[in-house]
Amino acid sequence: MKKLSFLIVSTFLFLSANSYAQDGGKGLLEKTIPEMQLKNTVGEMINTAQLENDGKPIIISFWATWCTPCKKELNAIHDLYIDWQDETGVRLVAVSVDDQRTASRVVPYVDSKAWEYEVLLDPNGDFKRAMGVNNVPHTFLVDGNGNIVYSHNNYAPGDEYELYDHILKLSEKKD
């Protein structure tokens, strides 16, 4: 049994190191946003690789209408978002991973919450997979140069303040 455990751990470490090396040692962080065509809530096509914010940070938050922690996170950020924008110019793009069965719930939910975010729809999960998202909520922070510099999975109350600390650090680097 010890030999089997050793073999499994050794294989995992080898594969992890190998994928790390193939990736230039960066992992997902410090990569740019993959290019995908997604619709927004009014049906316009948006190229994800062209998401920009005049050199200011962008938050990309993957969520779904059926995901309670997702909604809690985006609603908590909503309460602070105007102040965050005033202080840092940050932009939030909420990417719904609702599939064809639940996609019709997205716009009514967003409208009922009066979110100021841009909402994109990823019903086939193509962008989700390209970004390495396994479960939601999953939040990324992109710097003013388009590099992914922070990633956080799941949500607990107060996580929005940790995210904001990272946004502030990016904003301070610009000054």
Image (cartoon, grey):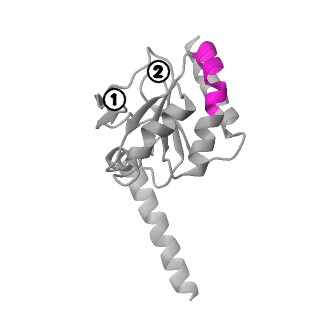
Considering the whole magenta stretch, tell me its main secondary structure: helix
> Foreground mark, 2 or 1?
1
- Where does the image place residue 106, in percent across and percent down from the top left? 44, 41
Residue at left offset 32%, top offset 30%: 49
For badge 1, the amino acid type reads: Val
On screen, residue 137 above or below 113: below
Q: Residue furthest bottom?
A: 1
Question: According to the image, label 1 marks what residue?
Answer: 42
Magenta region: which residues? 77-88
Question: Picture quarter containing residue 159?
Answer: top right
Q: In this view of the protein, which residue sits in the foreground, 122 or 34?
A: 122
In this rendering, does residue 25 appear at all? no
> The residue tagged with tag 2: helix, strand or loop?
loop
Q: In whole angstroms, how far apart are the C-alphas of marks 2 and 1?
A: 26 Å
The reply, left or right, for residue 73 in relation to residue 131 is right
Numbered tag placed on residue 144 in the rendering: 2
Q: How crowded is mark 1: few (under 14 residues within 10 Å), some or many (20 or more)?
A: few
On screen, residue 44 above or below 20: above
Indicate whether residue 147 is drawn in magenta: no
Q: In which quarter of the image is the C terminus?
A: top right
- Where does the image place residue 28, in percent across and percent down from the top left? 44, 43
On screen, residue 49 above or below 10: above
